[in-house]
Image: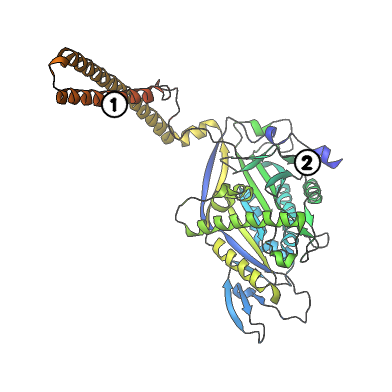
Amino acid sequence: ENRKSISVPRGGSTPRGSSSRRSVKSKRGTEKLRVAIRIRPLDSESDNGAFVAEQSAKAILELDSDDQNVLSTWSFDHVFDGTCPTNEVYMEVGESLVESGLEGHNGTLFAYGQTASGKTHTLMGSREEPGIVPLAISGVFDAISQAMYSKIIVRVSYIEVYNEDLRDLLSEDDPSSGRLKIVEDPQTGPWVRDALHEVAPSAEDCLNLFEFGEQQRSYGSTSMNDHSSRSHVLFRMTIKRGFSTNDTTDDTHDWETDNNTATRVSVLNFVDLAGSERLKKTGATGQVLKEANAINKSLMTLGSVISKLSEGDGGHIPYRDSKLTHLLSTSLGGNSFTTMVACISPHLSDREESNNTLRYATRAGKITTDGSVNAMGNMDAFLALHQEEIANLKSNLAQYETDLSLKDIEVDELRSELAYQAETITNSSIAQTNSTNELSNEERDMYIQEIAQLKKELEEERSKVRLSQSAPSKTPGTTPPPGTELGNDDG
């Protein structure tokens, strides 16, 4: 009943800002992707661990299994040992992200690590110990309640990537109907069309939506984890803030579509990545094996994206090689402040996997993102701020029209040359006819070869004319200049 009372139109018809508005990005500057490492507790206090956290030095220490000497050290932005509660992790890595989101910046926090390393517990938590996502929801609505000159709307979506298919976890219908597609939004990045984007009027409503989606997630059992997530999930909060000194309790005014209301739109993404799995250790078979292969493949693509971004050479980034990396493209290399929480197991038997996670996190820490405030002003403000851009567009259009005129001249020149070649061949043919009886065999062969060559040149010129005439219409204004075509959808 709670869900029905707050449901809104599906993603395609959910308001995403007035069409007469334009986004104005206010830069805060580039920033490194921030990395936090969390070590899960040892299952037995009598066991010696392979890793410990020195929080005062922000370092992870790898220990020798025999004498517990330090073998290597790893430095990160934050480190948390097995005794650190989740609310402390949230205060260090989640609270600032929420604050940035309320200021108008996009933010992403995602958990990475091998299966059974504590990722889902860190993000989702439990009734006894709430995770980062429930704590962030409370933080957002606590801030909203203190806003004096703002009207704020929060919309929520919850998407699962299962075996490279997108599923809407907030849908009461079959979430695996396969109708969902990823489309681009220049302001907030990739989003999923036709997925539900529910309005959450309060923290309680938002938590109800989150818990409903959690119940629909794909879980399974392996020899390493009795409650193993079999998919990647993305919980997104879209925050739209309108600034107004009028009475904020007046709901009769539609400020979302009012061009005179200055607004900001931002998104907060919380991503729980399924754990990487070594099939020999998980004992996966059947459907669980198929899921494991899909998980490992998408994580491999994510690793490739992170490696290329960390190199910073401006080369091609294969975001669209998987649904996961496409959804995370803005978070990893665009307009977003992003934090990775990498979870590792301290057990000696997991040393290799934990080292892989630490190396993965180190590469991710080299990535830079560019956070900007997504401010939306009225049309007058937009035109005032973008006069230079408008002038450049007019100049480009004039150049395009000039290029079209030059192209028409080239076509006329080809036609003239074609006529000349045709006349030359005709005259040669007449000359041959009139003098054939007077020519020797050697002279006749020479003329025949010349005529064949001229015919070949004629055919080449005709081909050029046909190619020019088959090009798009040369009427100025009817063909968009190169590079201005609309973007396409990507399933």
Residue drawn at point x = 76 percent, y = 45 percent: 169
Farthest bottom residue in view: 67
Mark 1 element type: helix
> Could you tell me the amino acid type at mark 2?
Ser
Q: Return the disc, 2 or 1, that comes first in the chain's sequence.
A: 2
Residue drawn at point x = 35 percent, y = 25 percent: 463
Residue 38 rendering spot, x and y as whole percentages = 68, 68
Real-space CA distance between mark 2 and mark 1, rounded to the nearest whole angstrom? 66 Å
Q: How crowded is mark 1: few (under 14 residues within 10 Å), some or many (20 or more)?
A: few
Residue 264 left/right relative to 229:
left
Q: Quadrant of residue 472?
A: top left
In the image, which disc is placed on residue 171? 2
Residue 319 left/right relative to 208:
left
Instruction: Say which quadrant the N terminus sits in.
Output: top right
Q: Quadrant of residue 241?
A: top right
Does 70 sit above or below residue 226?
Answer: below
Residue 189 rendering spot, x and y as whole percentages = 59, 44
Residue beneath disc 1: 456
Mark 2 element type: loop
Let me know if residue 147 appears in the view.
Answer: no
Pick the front one: 480 or 204: 480
